Structure formats: structure tokens, C-alpha cells
Amino acid sequence: MRVLLSNDDGIGAPGFAVLEAIARKLTKDIWVVAPETEQSGASHSLTLHRPLRVRQVRRRRFAVDGTPTDCVLLALNTLMKDNRPDLVLSGVNRGMNAADDVTYSGTVAVAMEATLLGVPAIAFSQDFTNRVHWSTAETHAPLLVCRLLAVGWPKDVLINVNFPDVVPTAVTGVEIARQGRYMFGDAVTERQDPRGRPYFWIGAENSDTDPTMRARERRRGTDLWALSRGAISVTAVSLDLTHRATQRRLEEAFARCSTSRASA
């Protein structure tokens, strides 16, 4: 199995070393195409208004001065076009990517771009409060990947995995969970620079340890609920964002409007 690795924390991030250790337990055919620097919060963005530079670190290992999406796009369409991977793994992110994080996450965006380009993908994130238990992801991910691949999933779906903030032996199991809800971007801090001009920081100053940031809506069956119980959350994320019920209601309403005009 040929595996491509990428992330949003950058090619030198501690979590990326963990991802490489996970991949080595699965295969020897590993390719790395990851951002040169941290790209957290980049979401599914592309670099369109400047050229991209690719630095070859060594054989099958490249650093890109762009976004996580840029990395996957370049990997599959250029660097690996004659050796496309069978699987893309992303992460391991420092901090969870559950609930509404999914829409901001560059880690998840790696899996999104791979899925759009026809390659199965899994995003990994390690939740933490104070200390990051990297060994939890490293211990449990390889078997989890094998189990997921054995089951399989549709071509327009990616798998988002979050590991709980516990040591490996304290993991309570694996829960197949739906995406939860909680707010992150509503914490904005305003300050002044030395010249008296205002500037802003989005997100709490200590978002990983601030009690208000850790207060999450933990409804039963969600990824947040699973993590709060010490379980690994596994969420199947669809790239089709269409809300079916609303779509049907709109179709019915606009069909009635068309009929009314025709009658008039």
C-alpha cells in the first residue's frame, strides 16, 4: 500500500512525526508532502495569487510553502502523478478537530482534497488540555486504519478521527459519532500596538486550557460526547453539503410558484 502523509501543523511538527510512526506500522511505501510552516485554520484554501515553491527534503519527502490543500493537489497531480497513493493520512493534529472545527481545519482539508481527487483519506487529531498524549494516537491509529479499510467508505466521504485526552491504556473504546456543535471563533481579543493602533486576536488567549473554551455541547452520540468519555471518535464526513430535507421543501415551494405563474 502506498500512503501519502500531510498535515497543517507543518512538516516539522511533533504530531507529524507521530503520523509517520503510524504509517510505518502499515507500509514501507510512504510519501510526505507537507506545508513548510504551520497552516492551522487554513481550511480548504488554495494559493492562487503567487507561485508555490517545493523543497525536496529527501527521497519521497517534500515541503511546500503553501496550504495543506496545495500540498495534496501538488502531490497527486505532479509529484506523485505516476505513483498515486492508495491512501492519504493527515495529522496528527495538535488539538481536536471535532464539531465545528471541521470547517476551519487544515488537517481535515487534506482529507477533503484527497477525497475530491479520488483517493481515500483519514484525518487524525489528538485532543489535549495541558499535556499532549501523542502515544494515544500512535498506539491506537494503526489498528483503527486497518479496521476502517476493511469496512471501506464511499468515494465522496472522508473519515475524521479524534483521539481523547487520555493515556493509551485509558481509552474506553471507539465510538462512531456524528459531528457535534460548539463555538470557537467568537472569542476575539482587542489590544493596542506600541503606536497605539488597535489589533485583534481571534480565539481565546489560552484556547486549549481556558475553561470557557473547553465547555462544549456534549450531546449523546456526537464526537464531543465520545471524547468527553475517553473514547476515540470516528466520524464519516460527506463532501456533499446539500441539506436534503430543505432541498425538497424548496423544490416543492418553487414548483408551486411556477404553477401559479403558469395559471395566471
Image: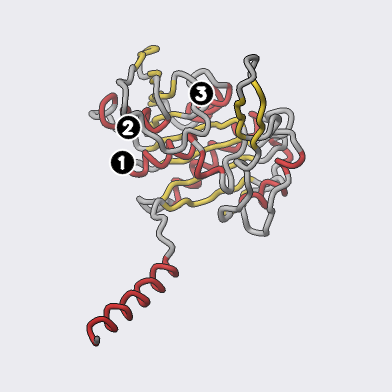
Q: Nearer the viewer, residue 250 or 21?
A: 250
Left or right of 42 on screen, residue 97: right
Left or right of 106 on screen, residue 3: left
State which mark lies toward you, 3 or 1: 3
Q: Which residue is mark 3?
A: 38
- CA gap between label 2 and label 3 equals 18 Å
Q: Disc 2 marks which amino acid?
A: Leu
State which mark lies toward you, 2 or 3: 3
Q: Disc 1 marks which amino acid?
A: Leu
Q: Which mark is residue 240?
A: none
Above/below status of 52 relative to 224: above
The answer to whether mark 1 and mark 2 are in CB contact below 8 A is yes
Q: Which circle's residue, 3 or 1, is located before the other in the chain? A: 3
Above/below status of 218 relative to 185: below
The answer to whether mark 2 and mark 3 are in CB contact below 8 A is no
Give the residue displayed 49% in from the left and 42% down from the top.
146
Give the residue displayed 27% in from the left and 78% down from the top.
258
Where disc 1 sits, the SS reads: loop
Q: Which mark is residue 73?
A: 2
Q: Which circle's residue, 2 or 3, is located before the other in the chain? A: 3
Image quadrant holding the N terminus, namely top left
Q: Disc 3 marks which amino acid?
A: Glu
Q: Which mark is residue 117?
A: 1
Image quadrant holding the C terminus, namely bottom left
Residue lying furthest bottom in this view?
Answer: 263
Where disc 2 sits, the SS reads: helix
- CA gap between label 1 and label 2 equals 8 Å
- CA gap between label 3 and label 1 equals 23 Å
